[in-house]
Image (spheres, coloured by chain):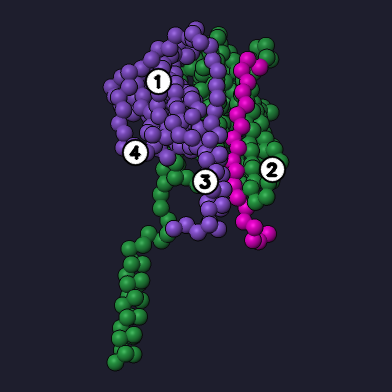
Chain colours: A purple, B green
Amino acid sequence: MISKSLIAPLLLLSASIFYTGCTTVNSAERAVPQALKNSVDLTRVTTDPSLKRKVYVVGMNESYVSGNMLKVQAELQNKTNSYQEFYYAFDWFDVDGMLVSSPTGGWRPSGIQARELKAITAVAPTPKTVDFRLKLRE
Amino acid sequence: MKLQKTILLFASIASALIFSGCASTGGGSYVNSQGPDTLVAGNQITITDFSIASDEMVNSLVSSGVLDRAPKQPAIMAISRVINDTREQFDTDQLVKKIRVALNQTGKVMTTTTVGFGGNAEDKMAEAIRAKKEYLEGKGSVPDTTPDFSLSGKIIQPPKVKDGNLRQNSYIFQLSLTETKSGLAVWEDEKTITKQYKKSSIGW
């Protein structure tokens, strides 16, 4: 049995949690997009279901810049009602499936607002790069 | 009897501490320099900041397509002055070298080490050998390595922002690629990295 003196603070606490947790992102965009995305079929490996529920990879598309440099873009969505911090990294592979290293590669810190859709992009380190792997972690 | 038990207990604890210390690595451990376990350090610039800035700059420059418009392929780039205008002391090569290596990997740019800011060649020996070959065999004996572009820039640190114990620290990376023939900046970009941290209320 909760004493009457505790009811008011508990109500205040739950209200504050409710309101701070609801700072979500509204957005607007063209109803019929003009861009033609070259979408990539994805294979997902999930080892952290908790992260997948928070920061979800909606899709990925690719294009080429500077003639022959593979550029990929991942669209992420925060499926929660609170801001999420995460790290991401791209691994790049050549036509033989060998890892291509880069001095500027590695894990990048990032954040995504509640319910926000966010794009992250990366350009392959060499023209010989044909494949990639996006990695996410909390 | 009780005293003996107490002594035995303390001896056991002491020996456990000593022996566990034998397996210690001295308190240090390796972390991946490109990994997420490097220290963030909100109040100072870190290798991760240079890595993020250089990665975004290279992506921006390659995506711009200006490198493909150079008369020579791969284009030749000289490194001009990149100024550290922050309140911290560091070598700007932590940024510039990463960019150079990454651009070199793309196959679209080669960096000259015999032309430098203020006439100071990075590799004085290579410059001397080149000059000697040119003197002995004529100008046509050495390839034209006149830079198509020069890279210059600045790293700025705006004043820190305070809100109670919370501090905000930013670094602004600005780079320009100038076409040497026209003197025009054909690509420019700016990346800002902002970090927040809490300052202890105790102490100075």
**In the image, what residue type sits under mark 3?**
Ser
Residue that badge 2 annotates: B161
Which residue is rendered at x = 53% and y = 53% of the image?
Answer: A7
Q: Residues within 10 Å of mark 4 (few under 14, many from 20)?
A: few
Q: Residues within 10 Å of mark 1 (few under 14, many from 20)?
A: many
Up the image or down, B96 lies above or below A36; here it is: below
Using the image, name the chain to which the residue with label 1 belongs: A
Q: Which residues are magenta?
A: B185-204
Whole-percent x and y of residue A20? 55, 40
Q: Is residue B141 above or below residue B131?
A: above
Q: Which mark is residue A14?
A: 3
Q: Which mark is residue A60?
A: 1
Question: Mark 4 — residue?
Answer: A48
Camera-side mark, 2 or 3: 3
Chain letter of the residue carrying label 2: B
Q: How far apart in space, not on screen, are marks 4 and 3 (Cα)?
A: 28 Å
Toward which corner of the image does residue B139 lie, by quadrant? Answer: top right
| Marks 2 and 1 close (CB-CB < 8 Å) | no
Looking at marks 4 and 1 on the same chain, the residue that comes earlier in the sequence is marked by: 4
Main secondary-structure element of the magenta-colored stretch:
strand
The three-letter amino acid code for the residue at tag 4 is Asp
Where residue A136 sits in the image (x, y, percent)?
A: 40, 34
Chain assignment, label 3: A
Q: Are marks 2 and 3 on the same chain?
A: no
Q: CA distance from mark 2 to mark 1?
A: 37 Å
Circle 2 sits in a helix, a strand or a loop, which is it? strand
Q: CA gap, disc 2 to disc 3?
A: 32 Å
Q: Nearer the viewer, residue B159 or B6?
A: B6
Asked if residue B128 lies left or right of residue B37, the reply is right
Q: Quadrant of the N terminus of chain B?
A: bottom left
Q: Is residue B194 found inside the magenta-colored segment of the image?
A: yes
Are the two marked residues, 4 and 3, in contact with CB atoms closer than 8 angstroms?
Answer: no
